[in-house]
């Protein structure tokens, strides 16, 4: 690898650089996006800062390698396991600070599945490839069927990468909606005098070929409101990949909300999905924090609804509805949102549970004001969403009245 050559070629670095390089490879395998420059910066930062203890090493590497809030837990788990496993922190401390006293490693945290796989795969000795047989059997037909219904929160790093690839290949909705502007149509109901006179010039005025205009159709725009609180973080990222793919075929406006409302539409229009998601994480600092659904909907209705709902779009509300301070304000803002759009679709990952019941106050306040209530926890649910958006707006699956809930405004 170029970064390995650059690090190994630097004089005086030795085992320090090798350990940090291996550590960065584990972070990559666990889902962090790190470029070669980040690895070189990490080595330089450790050399310049000097290490007096495990905490110094931790925060020096953290400052260089972690740029998104949601990556903190992965970094913490990989750090504790890697440096405890190799006793590497103590060795680096001895190398860089001769007066340092080794510290006992802290108690281990429960590892994430992607971190577990990174340690099993990235640190395993490389095996020789078998002969000339080149068969990619990572995802067989049965594996693909299983992947369709595997919960996003339970996917490994490889499975998430495959899920993102399949999301990008989804056949997006082909629904059309009439707009006010007219287009040329030989069977249109309106006579286009200007086009007819222009066409008569080619005949020298001997006769006037009649040109007509009819209603114009185009895919309706989509506005997405995505909850990025701690309980939704595992589902928000696949949904954002879906919205990125959808944005290549129609206009999509995307807002993230946790403790604040953030418009990430411009960031999500980047052609590369990984770069788009990286930029989204940069402009949304409240990722994996708390949630204030009522406040966020109020801010959207007050500041953005006239600008982004003017063309009567489809609105996708992606949240689990677990609002601690649910009151009449939440129901009122939901009612206003529903009345302002063509179709309000609530996507809730809690519907993955067969025995789901709307017991939470927030869910009971929101449910009567949506047109459709759908799951969004796996690839199959996204495929079903595409099929639903391609058809007419019909109250399918679970709605407020199905649970005995009526809208009260």
Image (cartoon, rainbow, N blue to C red):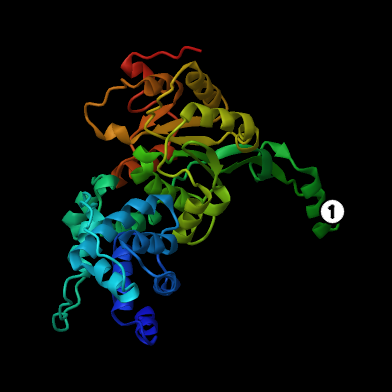
Is 386 in front, or is 212? 386
Is 295 in front, or is 195? 295
Quadrant assignment, res 115: bottom left
Q: Residue at x 55, y 30 (%)?
A: 341
Q: Position of residue 133 (x, y in %)?
A: 16, 79
Q: Residue at x 37, y 32 (%)?
A: 320
**Side of 84 relative to 56 (left or right):** left
Q: Position of residue 374 (x, y in %)?
A: 35, 33
Viewport quadrant of the N terminus: bottom left
Q: Residue at x 65, y 45 (%)?
A: 185
Quadrant assignment, res 85: bottom left
Q: Is residue 161 above or below residue 384?
A: below
Q: Can residue 138 be seen by looking at this rendering?
A: no
Is 348 in front, or is 189? 348
SS label for mark 1 = loop
Q: Position of residue 396 (x, y in %)?
A: 36, 28
Residue placed furthest toward the right? 205
Q: Can residue 127 be seen by looking at this rendering?
A: yes
- Local packing at callout 1 (Cα closer than 10 Å; few below 14, some 14-19, many 20+) is few
**Side of 28 relative to 312 (left or right):** left
**Side of 285 relative to 379 (left or right):** right
Q: Position of residue 109 (x, y in %)?
A: 23, 50
Name the residue beneath numbered marker 1: 206
**Label total for image:** 1
């Amino acid at each position: 690898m170029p970064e390995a050559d650059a690090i190994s070629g630097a004089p005086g670095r030795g085992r320090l650089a090798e350990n940090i390089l291996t550590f960065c490879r584990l972070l990559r395998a666990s889902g962090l996006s790190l470029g070669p420059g980040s690895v070189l910066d990490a080595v330089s930062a450790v050399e310049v800062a000097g290490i007096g203890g495990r905490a110094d090493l931790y925060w020096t590497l953290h400052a260089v390698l972690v740029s998104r809030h949601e990556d903190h837990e992965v970094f913490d788990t990989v750090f504790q396991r890697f440096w405890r496993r190799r006793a590497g922190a103590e060795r680096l401390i001895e190398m860089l600070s001769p007066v340092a006293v080794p510290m006992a490693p802290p108690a281990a945290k429960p590892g994430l599945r992607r971190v577990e796989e990174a340690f099993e795969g990235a640190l395993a000795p490389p095996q020789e490839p078998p002969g000339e047989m080149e068969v990619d059997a990572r995802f067989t037909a049965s594996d693909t069927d299983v992947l369709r219904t595997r919960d996003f929160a339970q996917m490994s790093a490889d499975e998430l990468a495959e899920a993102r690839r399949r999301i990008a290949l989804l056949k997006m909705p082909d629904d059309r909606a009439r707009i006010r502007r007219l287009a040329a149509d030989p069977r249109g109901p309106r006579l286009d005098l200007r086009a007819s006179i222009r066409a008569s010039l080619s005949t020298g005025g001997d006769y006037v070929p009649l040109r007509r205009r009819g209603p114009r159709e185009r895919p309706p725009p989509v506005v997405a409101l995505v909850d990025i609180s701690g309980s939704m973080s595992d589902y928000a990222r696949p949904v954002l990949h879906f919205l990125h793919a959808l944005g290549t075929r129609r206009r999509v406006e995307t807002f993230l909300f946790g403790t604040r409302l953030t418009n990430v539409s411009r960031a999500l229009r980047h052609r590369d999905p990984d770069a788009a998601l990286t930029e989204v994480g940069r402009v949304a600092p409240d990722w994996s924090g708390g949630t204030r659904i009522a406040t966020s909907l109020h801010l959207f209705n007050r500041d953005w609804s006239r600008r982004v709902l003017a063309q009567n779009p489809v609105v996708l509300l992606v949240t689990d509805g677990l609002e601690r301070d649910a009151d009449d304000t939440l129901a009122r803002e939901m009612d206003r949102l529903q009345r302002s759009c063509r179709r309000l679709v609530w996507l809730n990952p809690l519907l993955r549970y067969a025995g789901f019941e709307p017991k939470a106050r927030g869910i009971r306040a929101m449910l009567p004001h949506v047109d459709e209530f759908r799951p969004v926890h796996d690839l199959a649910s996204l495929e079903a969403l595409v099929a639903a958006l391609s058809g007419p707006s019909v109250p399918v699956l679970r709605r407020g009245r199905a649970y005995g809930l009526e809208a009260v405004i």
